[in-house]
């Protein structure tokens, strides 16, 4: 199954595999618990991971987990919120750096989103699969974050269409397609693969421009890579 393949340990992001059970004494308590929870949720799912599983993975006691989190749900929400806050912040920064040109802005936003999701495939997988496990209030907060991220792309595409730079007949659908395409890199990306995250991001930046029907585009210098 596709989801099972995405959890294959071979070639996992360093952000997924860092740390081992029992190594928490050398890292801040909250972070070692978060890292362990990410590994457990990624391998077994939220429902398949108990508090005991997480604390054993972290090398701490259940009391240590409850010192920081009232529940497993709170821990899941922190993982998701942190990841989404970073997604939003990195996209905003990429848009600022790109300047006023809509094509350059969309290219930069798409690249940034690919690079962030490829940098931590486990957390990306959790964020995009465990929304089903969020309690109603937490789900509402997460949907608001997702909407905020999507709106950054929507505004960029709408601006390009208004200025005649993009020719997409359905800007909203095209913008959503760009975000989904870039997000789902985390489903298949492996460090052992033939392309680096930067190379993938460069290609996806161009695919994003194709999706919105860019009538012109800046000349973006390609990274150095070899096809295989």
Image (cartoon, helix red, strand yellow):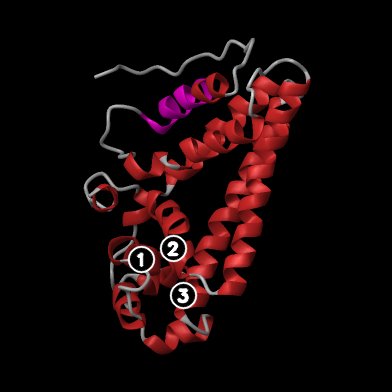
Numbered label attached to residue 29: 3
Q: Earlier in the sequence, mark 2 or mark 3?
A: 3
What residue is rendered at 24% in x and 19% in y? 228
Q: Secondary structure at mark 2?
A: helix
What residue is rendered at 63% in x and 27% in y? 106
Percent x, y of residue 105: 67, 27
Q: Is residue 106 left or right of residue 24?
A: right
Numbered label attached to residue 130: 2
Q: Main secondary structure of the magenta part?
A: helix
Q: Earlier in the sequence, mark 1 or mark 3?
A: 3
Residue 198 magenta-highlighted:
yes
Q: Which residues are magenta?
A: 196-206
What residue is rendered at 36% in x and 86% in y? 61
Q: Is residue 176 left or right of residue 66?
A: right
2 over 108 or under it: above or below: below
Percent x, y of residue 74: 52, 76
Whether residue 46 can be seen here: yes
Crowd class of label 1 (few under 14; some 14 to 19; many from 20; radius 10 Å): many
Query: CA gap, disc 2 to disc 3?
Result: 24 Å
What residue is rendered at 48% in x and 82% in y? 71
Q: Secondary structure at mark 3?
A: helix
Numbered label attached to residue 41: 1
Check whether the beta carbons of the residues at disc 1 and disc 3 lie within 8 A of each other: no
- Please identify, in this view, whether the residue under mark 1 or under mark 3 is nearer the observer: 1
């Amino acid at each position: 199954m596709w989801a099972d393949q995405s959890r294959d340990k071979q070639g996992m992001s360093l952000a997924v595999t860092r740390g081992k059970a029992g190594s928490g004494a050398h890292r801040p308590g909250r972070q070692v618990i978060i890292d362990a929870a990410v590994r457990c949720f990624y391998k077994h799912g939220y429902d398949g991971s108990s508090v005991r599983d997480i604390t054993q993975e972290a090398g701490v006691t259940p009391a240590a987990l409850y010192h920081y989190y009232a529940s497993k749900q709170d821990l899941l929400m922190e993982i998701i919120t942190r990841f989404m806050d970073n997604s939003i912040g990195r996209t905003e920064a990429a848009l600022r750096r790109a300047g006023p040109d809509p094509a350059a802005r969309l290219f930069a936003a798409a690249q940034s989103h690919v690079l962030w999701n490829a940098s931590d495939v486990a957390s990306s997988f959790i964020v995009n699969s465990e929304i089903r496990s969020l309690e109603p209030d937490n789900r509402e907060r997460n949907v608001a974050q997702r909407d905020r991220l999507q709106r950054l792309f929507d505004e960029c595409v709408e601006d390009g269409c208004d200025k005649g730079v993009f020719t997409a007949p359905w800007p909203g659908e095209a913008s959503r397609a760009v975000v989904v395409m870039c997000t789902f890199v985390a489903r298949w990306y492996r460090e052992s693969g033939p392309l680096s995250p930067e190379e993938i991001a460069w290609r996806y930046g161009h695919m994003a421009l194709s999706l919105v029907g860019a009538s012109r585009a800046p000349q973006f210098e390609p990274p150095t890579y070899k096809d295989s």
